[in-house]
Image: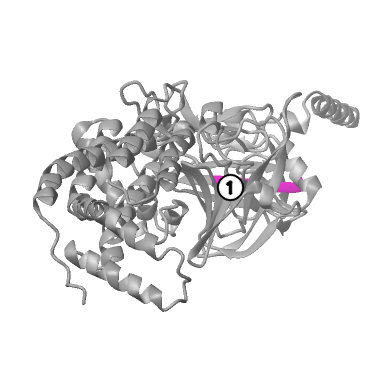
Amino acid sequence: MEERRLLLAVALSLLILTGYSLLFGPGDRPPAETPASEAPASSDGWPLPATPSEPEASSLAGGEAEIAEEAGARVTLKVAAEREQRVEVLGPDFTIAFSNRGARLLSWTLAHYRTAADKPEEMVPALTRGPKPLDIETGDPSVDERLRQALFVPSTHTLRLRGTSPRTLSFRYADGQVEAVKALTFQGGGLVSISVSVTSGDQPIQGRLLWGPGIGNPSEEEKDVRGFVEPQAVFLAGGDVERVAASDLAPAGQPLPAVRWVGVASRYFAALLIPTEGSGAAEIRPATLPAGPEEEPTVAAIALVEASRGAPVLLYVGPKDHQALKDLGYGLEHVVPIGDWIGPIVVPLMRLLRWVHAQVGNWGWAIVILTVLINMLMAPLRHYSIANSMKMAKMSPELKAIQGRYRKVPMMDPRRQKMQEEMGELYARHGMSMSTQMLVGCLPLLLTMPFLFAFYRVLDISVELRGASFLWIPDLSHKDPLFITPVLMGVSMYAMQKMMPSIMDPAQQRIMMLMPVVLGGMFLAAPAGLNLYWLTANLWSLLQQIVEMKILQPKAAATPPKKGRKKR
């Protein structure tokens, strides 16, 4: 009797256990809790930091994590989210958005820079297909495609950056065969540290981090500005910066054995990848972008850098601000094309322009004021040039008469020496030296040109002019919508040439009078800030020329030429 009861109890127990296992599978059991004091880790030991005050990644993403026990060791078999979700990083200077599908970057907007539509400037190209910035490439197409489609589990849905304390956003995925971790640490100084780990079948795979294709989304107004250049691949190897247009890159790409940084840069913005070990292997390559029905396909640049385990990559995304990039180190300021020989002048002028702007509060007026200040400093040198031109104009008839008498004399004829003697006497009677005339006439111009070119370069590279308005001009980095500044610039240049005494023959004078028309036409599509600078400089020069000629002409008329030596 007792044996029957025992057998019945065993049968009922087996029936209950079998029914429970059928109704509730192993995937429906609640996962084991991770102690609060321990941060989750991948199977290869990479940390997945999470803010204590924020929910854990698995619960946030609704992800699935299967854990197996083997000889007392925890081995991750599967870590994946249940659905695609948006993950954001909110900082004072930028807003970044990822998709947990592939841990891919969707958006990187700059809070302090606005488009013509008054929206934050977007650094991520608007492409629906192809690679995206911060994608991981392993060299194995099947692994790369699997990672791009994988639903990563983020450490948080929203990461808010406050102060300068580093904060980390991490993505993790594992499917039993491939495991990947991407962790971004925002350091608070403008750089982001990115760590990448990929394993396949418990074997680590070398991953590369990329940026591209291109950077930003230039508007049609920007493309219409003279001098517009599509975003280029840039890299610093040694002490020299190389800039390569995407159209000049070989289809297979260009490997770079050792670079200090590599990236993609437009006129005003850049995304730069920096190996933290001082230098690292990188590559730049072209990518053909899809086009609309009536558009031609375009080519954009992609930059890649090795992101090996234990050596994170630093990333800078933002404006090409020379001083800010110099403060970050790593030679990042070299991405700003200040020029080689005028660079020492450009940097102080950039600081001076910002100081003037801080006083007046408008970039247009800052350009006008600084242009006037520079021309005031150059006024004494221009004085000598104007005075020299007037002297040359006064003696021009006699000089042409001498040249006319010897016009038919061959160049190697000894009588040419007699012409040089007569010209020397003419210069002496007018208080001038024939040997130093060229130096006196050209030196003032040569001394002023470096400063003028340097300030021109300042305005050409200053990201602050982007979106800055002045009177009728809505954006000083775009062309003048009414073409007032380029037209006035050409008119002022014509007036200067018309007033300046000349010793050129009529044919040469007519050619020179065409220069204002040609330059005015060329500058119609130039940035309004540059046209404002040239117009202000021309108006100052014209005013100085009028005043100088009114003062010098009476003196020149009252001073008779010195008597020359009597002919024997």
Q: Which residues are magenta?
A: 176-183
Q: Quadrant of the N terminus?
A: top right
Q: Residue at x 37, y 50 (%)?
A: 504
Coordinates of residue 286 in the picture (x, y in percent): 69, 47
Q: Nearer the viewer, residue 128 or 426?
A: 426
Q: Residue at x 54, y 49 (%)?
A: 194
Coordinates of residue 528 in the picture (x, y in percent): 39, 32
Residue 550 located within the stretch drawn in magenta: no
Residue 75 visible somewhere in the drawing: no
Hey, which residue is sitting farthest front in the picture?
Answer: 568
Horizontally, is 384 left or right of 445 in the view?
left
Establish if 114 lies above or below 503: above
Mark 1 lies on a secondary structure that is: strand
Task: Using the rendered view, name the quadrant where residue 494 is placed.
Answer: top left
Residue 178 located within the stretch drawn in magenta: yes
Q: Residue at x 65, y 39 (%)?
A: 132
Specify the amino acid type for callout 1: Gln
Horizontally, is 499 left or right of 405 in the view?
left
Q: Nearer the viewer, residue 93 or 38?
A: 93
Coordinates of residue 331 in the picture (x, y in percent): 43, 59
Coordinates of residue 84 in the picture (x, y in percent): 66, 27
Q: Quadrant of the C terminus?
A: bottom left
Q: Residue at x 88, y 26 (%)?
A: 8
Q: Nearer the viewer, residue 435 or 348?
A: 435
Task: Using the rendered view, name the quadrant where residue 536 is placed.
Answer: top left
Label tally: 1
In this figure, which residue is indicated by the disc labeled 1?
232
Structural crowding at the residue carrying mark 1, measured as other residues with C-alpha within 10 Å and reported as few (<14), some (14–19) or many (≥20): many
* Helix, strand or loop: magenta stretch: strand
